[in-house]
Image: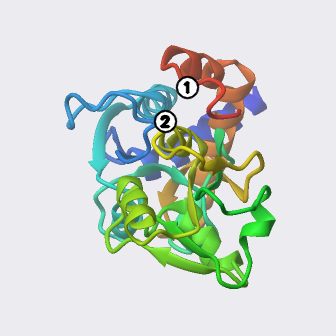
Amino acid sequence: EAEETKTMSMLAAAKAVLAPRGTVRAAINMSNILLVTNRADPAQPGGVAPDMAAALADALGAKLQLVPYENPGALADSAGAGEWDVGLIGAEPARAAIIGFSAPYAEIEATYLVRPGVPFHTAAQVDTEGVRVASSRRSAYTLWLEDNLRAAQLVQTEEPGAEGSWDLFQDRELEALAGLRSFLTGKAAELPGSRLLDDRFTSIQQAIGTPRGDAAACDAAVAFLDSFVADAKSSGLVANLLAKHGVEGKLSV
């Protein structure tokens, strides 16, 4: 009975932050092609991320309103604007200052595609003097590269977008293109002789975040989100969603 009371109070504390008006406003990153696989109706996107948001709303006993954003940078920028209650986005340290994140519910590999004639076979070799790496501005993997590349030059797109990074890579004949493995696999087929590296330079931790306002309230909300994510993974919900949307093998749980 004491445990049940504790669970109920945890739910009430989380609901006060995550669904204060009885509706969870869930921010969705529309540019993540693995987590948002149906964009036919931009107002009602489909995929793993929207389904996770729906499951969270159910767990809170709340309604759901999806709030789509064109890219993760725009989603993160709006954290303090009161536009959303939870955001499904890559948990990067640069974002953690303004967003409290749950444990990850899935991971996506980020690696490099190298131009024909470039001799590299591992991600570590790409970080070499004279190497230029094309990357999509403000993506989670670009934030990681900003902090971790030591010798190679990071060349970012003017606006966020993976397709823009491909254009940059091609137009300027850069040595390497950074991106999510699934995106780069498709591009490798368009550039005969290019090589998709077998290893990765990082894994994007896909998590559920909430804007950092009151510290204690945010901590209570994140504790609930951690519990929800742990249940979603252990129950097989996440694995089932990956299968439902045809992205198993492209993300890991």
Give the side of residue 82 with respect to residue 197, left or right.
left
Give me the residue at 39% from left, 44% from top. Answer: 19
Within 10 Å of the Cα at label 2, are there few (<14), some (14-19), or many (20+) other Cα atoms?
many
Where residue 186 sits in the image (x, y, percent)? 49, 38
Where residue 167 sits in the image (x, y, percent)? 36, 60
Where residue 56 sits in the image (x, y, percent)? 49, 32
Give me the residue at 69% from left, 78% from top. Answer: 149
Mark 2 or mark 1: name the one nearer the start of the chain: 2
Circle 1 SS class: loop
Give the side of residue 89 with respect to residue 107, left or right.
left
Circle 2 SS class: loop
Residue 220 position by quadrant:
bottom right
Residue 171 in the image: above or below residue 162? below
Question: Residue 247: which disc?
Answer: 1
Where residue 172 sits in the image (x, y, percent)? 42, 72
Which amino acid, mark 1?
Answer: Val
Question: Residue 34: which disc?
Answer: 2
Within 10 Å of the Cα at label 1, are there few (<14), some (14-19), or many (20+) other Cα atoms?
some
Give the side of residue 41 with respect to residue 3, left or right.
left
Which amino acid, mark 2?
Answer: Leu
Q: Nearer the viewer, residue 158 or 73?
A: 158
Q: Are marks 2 and 1 in contact (CB under 8 Å)?
A: yes
